[in-house]
Image (cartoon, rainbow, N blue to C red):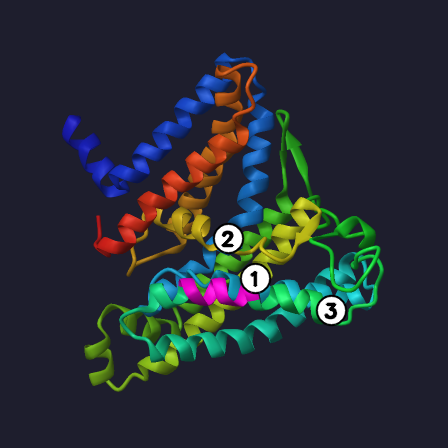
Amino acid sequence: MTNSIGKAINRIGIPTFAVGLLLLVLLITAGVQGQSIPTLITDILNRVGMNGLLVLAMVPAIKSGTGPNFALPVGIEGGLMALMICMQFDFSGWFLIFTSLLLSIVLCTILGWLYGKLMNAVKGAEMTIATYSGFSIVAFFNIFWLAIPFSNRKMGWMLGNGLRETIQFKNFNASRIISDLLKIEIAGVAIPFGMMLVFALFCFLVWMFFQSKTGMAIFAGGQNPRFAEASGLNIDRNRVIANIISTILAGIGIIIYSQGYGYAQLYNGPLNMAFPAVAAVLVGGATASKASIPNVLIGVCLFQGLMTTAMPVMNQLFTGTDLSDIMRIIIQNGVILYALTKVKSGGDR
């Protein structure tokens, strides 16, 4: 019995098992404290649906051999740009969502192609260059949001030029439009069924892509570039394709993420969004060279569950003091620190 449990833990991964156990302890503690477990589970499900595609964007990049996509802000800015263009024309409701998703695919394809070319030019230092690329594009768009002549007053400052720091979706009748789609309630838990279906659909599409000839070629090149090149595969081309897909997923993901909160955050909002996504997929069992859809599903559930549950539990333990932001920083950066150590080692568990 003990050997079976040990083998199961090793198969899951000790860090993944430890984080899952910590989440279970926190949920039990929250129940003992009298907190509403259905409310916590509802919040976790909402966060999973909102962040899922941003974590899924890690899979193509990792499989291609470029490592976790620390340049996630490249795709995020492309998605935000698509949103801003559609809002400029005062699109609203589902029309706003669909047109921004389509435009995001176009813009992120261009950005992903440029980013993929950059990754091919810096082989061996992809993660370092990716991080600086993400920071750089955020700085560029900070200037862009101020300089571009958007005229829709729902988006701009009351005085002067430029866009506001946050753009409210309610002004365009699109706040939580996907999150509340087909929402059902079971035992007090509100399940965002529509948003989960969207997440599941993209997971299925990514899985299907990597069953195709191109997908398997990308994976082969990421695992053993020399053998793949000797077999006649175009490694550089496949890496570009993988990074285009990763960038598109990030662009679509930020639109789903933003409608869930009810606003789009510009300027420095996307600056550090790559790190929680990288941490989530690695906590789910991925490494710097291997990732799968189950790693995404497990990782986003564990990471977002930990983030959601730990803050109210700790605030209840330390009454009279608001530790929510402090705990958020400790939890997020602690998990990211673990993730970065796994990236550095690059080894399987």
Residue 273 - label: 2
Q: Which residues are magenta?
A: 131-139
Q: Secondary structure at mark 3?
A: helix
Give percent across and percent down for residue 94: 76, 58
Amino acid type shown at disc 3: Ile
Closer to the chain start, of discs 2 and 3, is 3
Q: Nearer the viewer, residue 221 or 202?
A: 221
* Residue drawn where x is 53% and y is 74% of the image: 111
Visible in this render: residue 224?
Answer: yes
**Which SS class for mark 1?**
helix
Q: Is residue 75 above or below residue 278?
A: below
Residue 209 left/right relative to 137: left
Image quarter of residue 78 = bottom right
Is residue 134 part of the magenta span, yes or no? yes
Residue found at x 45% / y 51%:
277
- In the rendered view, does 287 fall on the left or right side of 91? left
Residue at the disc numbered 3: 85
Among numbered discs 3 and 1, the one appearing first in the sequence: 1
In the image, residue 175 lies in the stretch drawn in magenta: no
Which corner quadrant of the image does residue 156 belong to? bottom right
The reply to whether the C-beta atoms of the residues labelled 1 and 2 are less than 8 Å apart is yes
**Left or right of 334 on screen, residue 328:** right
* Element type at mark 2: loop
Secondary structure mostly seen in magenta is: helix
Disc 1 marks a residue whose amino acid type is Ile
Amino acid on which the number 2 mark rests in the picture: Met
